[in-house]
Each structure stands twice: as structure tokens, then as C-alpha cells.
Amino acid sequence: MRHFLFLFFGLMLPMTAMGNISLTTFYMEFDADSPRRTDNLRFTNTSDSPKTYDISMVNFAQNSDGEYRPIETPMMGNPFADSYLDFAPRRVTLAPSQSQVVRVVRRPMAGAENGEYVSHLKIQELPDQTMMNSGATNSNGININLRPLYAVTIPVMIEKGSPRASALIRSVEIYNAKTNPIAAVMVERGGNRSFYGTLVVTDDGVELGRVSNFRIFMTTSARVIKIPLNRRPLPGSMVTLYD
């Protein structure tokens, strides 16, 4: 019997293009009080061969460094959105440069509590026959195949009622990297929804670096945002948080 080991690259942040997949949107947002209940995601096979993709809903907790870890049970104040969402298709095979539209529909939420509901739509590349037939076999009959299988995820959020978010800067540390210095800024989130913001480092009105449109989800009370700088800031430099 031959066993196969594939190397999965799971991307926990939405990307416009990565590996063999490109996307047309970064996230989906639904308002439970709005009559609009449908949204679409379009993705494309950017490789030079046919690819099969599994499409599913998954749930994550966000760590303080922005990385995601899978969770099965909702955390306090962070209900999952997947039980209120339908989507199709669930699996699709695409030729090179072919695209597919995934349709996501929000179910009625009349009995749901107010707040923000979050899950992630995941598009996972599956191994093809070429992968299954390639790779080195060791003395135990195990076929080791380290070809990457790419996955991308985007957050799908439902807001019910009028949840609000706030944030403030708790600390700033500057340290030297191999090339340019980096500002590590701890941002603390408040309120009952995810926070979306931009951080900008300036020195006497001159921008030294920024990180735009970062997210702190409801699973995370504080997140450290790392900002590459074009030079070390002088005393009196400013870090500004925009929402």
C-alpha cells in the first residue's frame, strides 16, 4: 500500500492572488436587517493545468500576531456565521484560466441575538492524478510528495443590530530587522464587532511606514501589528491609528 503526504499551504488572510488561485474579493459582509441576502465570490485557476477545488466553511480564532488557528466551538461573544449561510458549489474542477462564481446566501435571522457573526469561506486545491503518481517512495512504501496544495480563505461576516468597534494603541516598540527597522504596535480592540483600521508612522510629517486595512476579529482582544519602516524614527515621531 502506498501512502501519500502532501504539503498544504493554508492562507488565513484573503489575497487577490496566491499560488494557483486568484480572488475578486477580500471579504463578504451581510446585514441581517437588510433585504440583500446574496453575495458572490469569483475565483480563477491561475495554474497551467486543470485543478479541482473543495469549497467549505471553516472557523478560526485569531492570535495576537494575526495568525489563525482552527476552532470548533464559538468563543464568548463571537458566534459563528456558518449556521446562517448556504453556498454553492461545494466542489468544482477548473481548466487553466477558467473562473467559478461561488454564491453565498444568508438565511433568515429573526430569532438570532444582536451582534457580529463570523466564519470563513475556504477554497482548497485538491491533489490531481499527476501528484498521486509522482514522488519518491521510501523503504516502507510511503510516497512522499511535497508539491504544494494551495488554500485561500476569506471572512464572511453577518451583522445583526448595530454592533460597534473601538480600538486604541497600547504600546509601540521599534526594533531592527535585517534590512529596515520595524515598528511593533499593540492595538487593543473594544466593542462588540471586529475592528478594521490603518496604522501610519510619521516623523515630522514624513511617512515612514503604514499597514492598511488590518483586522482584529472578535476572538482577539489585542493584536500586534508589525510595520516595516524606511528608516529608524527619531524621538517625537508619531504612530496614528485610523478606523
Image: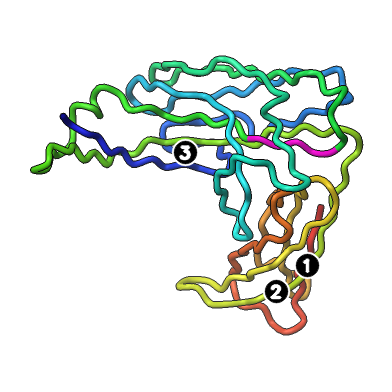
State the residue lying farthest toward the right. 162
State the residue lying farthest toward the bottom. 235
Q: Indicate left or right for 166 with 102 as reference.
A: right
Percent position of residue 204, x then y: 77, 75
Give the alpha-carbon distance from disc 1 to disc 2, as whole Å: 8 Å
Percent position of residue 206, x then y: 73, 69
**Residue pictured at 77% horizontal, 73% vertical:** 238
Q: Indicate left or right for 117 with 92 as reference.
A: right
Magenta residues?
A: 115-119
Give the mark nearer the N terminus: 1 vs 3: 3
What residue does disc 2 label? Answer: 172
Question: For the stretch drawn in magenta, what is the main secondary structure?
Answer: strand
Give the alpha-carbon distance from disc 1 to disc 3, as whole Å: 31 Å
What residue does disc 1 label? Answer: 169
Where residue 18 is drawn, which disc sits there?
3
Crowdedness near tag 3: few (<14), some (14–19) or many (≥20) residues, C-alpha within 10 Å: some
Q: Indicate left or right for 239 with 209 as reference.
A: right
**Residue pictured at 52% horizontal, 18% vertical:** 90
